[in-house]
Image: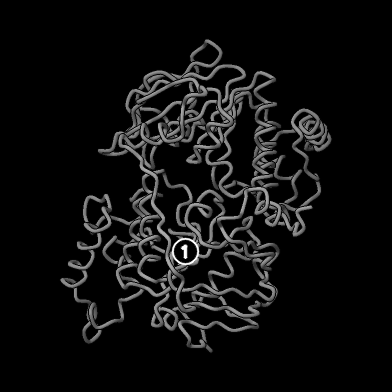
Amino acid sequence: MQGICKRFGTVLANDRVDLTLYPGDILGLLGENGAGKTTLMNVLFGVYTADAGRIRLEGREVAIRHSADALKLGIGMVHQHFHLVPRHTVLENLMVGQTGGGWRLDRGGVQDRMAEIEDQFGLRLAPDALVADLTIGQQQRLEIVKALVRGARVLILDEPTASLTPQEADGLFEALEAMAGLGMGVIFISHKLNEVRRLTSRIQILRQGRVVAAMANEAGLTRRRLAEMMCDCEIEALPKPPVAAGRPLLSVENLGTAAGAGARLDNVSLTVHAGEILGIAGVSGNGQSELAEVLAGMLPAAAGSVVIDGQRVRRISPRRVQSLGVGRIPEDRLGTGLIPSLPLSRCMVLPRLGERRFNRWGFLRHGAIRRFVLRQVTRFDIRTPGTEVRTGNLSGGNLQKALLARELAWDPLVLVAAQPTRGLDVAAARFVHERFLDLRSRQRAVLLISEDLEELFALCDRIAVMYEGRIMDTLPAAGATVRSVGLLMAGVKDAA
């Protein structure tokens, strides 16, 4: 890719970017949120058309007007959010968009290609399995197989390990290394710098749409140095001073939910104390989301009890838990936490619109709303052109800051945070972590649900691991290891 420029209105997302990928290369593409990584890859995959620049493939210039062109040229992309049809089988998902001979689809040909891919890369899938029944790791595998079935020689992976266990990530890395060994080229986008250091052969860093560094992944290159090049500032270790745990602020006993959509909670018990961060680890789909929704009053409990600061909550509703001092950072920040089409000023006060501070006799107090939002925007350094900007136009890091600002403005006793740094760059994630540790130092409680084990080890005092709706075990964070937690995440309680 040579001199690639892409502009959205007044924002120059890619500014004369050059990128070269070699056969057998695994290139790590790094940068802060909004640095232009995904935009650049969407230009390569045909989602966007570049305003300037050219793309050469194996020495000849090519025109990529849409994704079908990219696929024909052997370029495949696995997006952070999978593009699969849950009600169809693995084989049917692989055949979407495929042409056959005459009036019949070539099911046999696709199955033969699946077998070849399994032999070459160890990516095994049952052709007749429903996608809805696959684990997140298997769905990731299916997306990669889909690209390979279509003949990809260049494979782009955008945050591919965000929802994988350590063991599943190891399997993915082995497959990618095997692809590189056969002469394929892989572009690996990730904010997990330890994975980038482990896997890639070269690294390229974008900042504000421009290439600021390109280098070989050599032994002397440190994660800290990479983070500093991404952010253009020094990254110091985040201090975590000892804090004495106080009284229980949130207790859950024998919690269960009815069978239905999502994972069923099965006899879940846990306690979070004042001055404590309790982490919840687990592969996506094992009950973590349901636990957060029950505690937020979004999902009814079929059994068990919830006690907040000594008060048993008999009828859990969003307004009730909010009145008892529970703040919530939902997993889906745009689908559940914020409304993309509304102005930022409205989204920042949504849960409190009925309160007298913002509402008098049924009429909104616009001046009070504006003053509150401006204070939070300043306090949390939310990068926005103004408070009336459409919320969906903010970057991921600023959306997360807006959610934090809204919830922390009321100094919650307990904060339930689900995947709070997923997809955030080093600087934005550090900002979120600092807020959590501040709550801990002020004898508040944080229930941190995360699939990032590094995040859990860095912040938590204890880690509870969920599998199929149950708590497998709760470990002191100081004595936990990636292996021990990873095995529990896979349902193995006895490490021996």
Query: Could you say whether the residue bearing mark 1 is in a helix, strand or loop?
Result: strand
Which x, y percent locates residue 4? 38, 24
The residue singled out by tag 1 in the image is 417
Which x, y percent locates residue 65? 48, 28
Residue at 69% x, 62% y: name it.
467
Q: Quadrant of the N terminus?
A: top left
Front-most of 27 and 37?
27
Which x, y percent locates residue 242? 43, 61
Compared with 472, 189 (above or below) is: above
Compared with 124, 5 (above or below) is: above
Q: Is residue 276 left or right of residue 471?
A: left
At label 1, counting other C-alpha atoms closer than 10 Å, the crowd grade (few under 14, some 14-19, many 20 or more) is many
Which x, y percent locates residue 140? 65, 44
Residue at 53% x, 31% y: name it.
197
Res. 36 image quadrant:
top left
Q: Is residue 338 left or right of residue 189?
A: left
Residue at 69% x, 20% y: name it.
182
Residue situated furthest top in the rendering = 59
Front-most of 67 and 416?
416
* Scheme of image coloration: one colour
Residue situated furthest left in the rendering = 367
Res. 265 image quadrant:
bottom right
Front-most of 235 and 29?
235
Residue at 34% x, 52% y: name it.
398
Front-most of 225 and 296?
225
Count of all numbered marks drawn on residues in the image:
1
Compared with 220, 12 (above or below) is: below
The amino acid beneath tag 1 is Ala
Q: Is residue 262 left or right of residue 274?
A: right
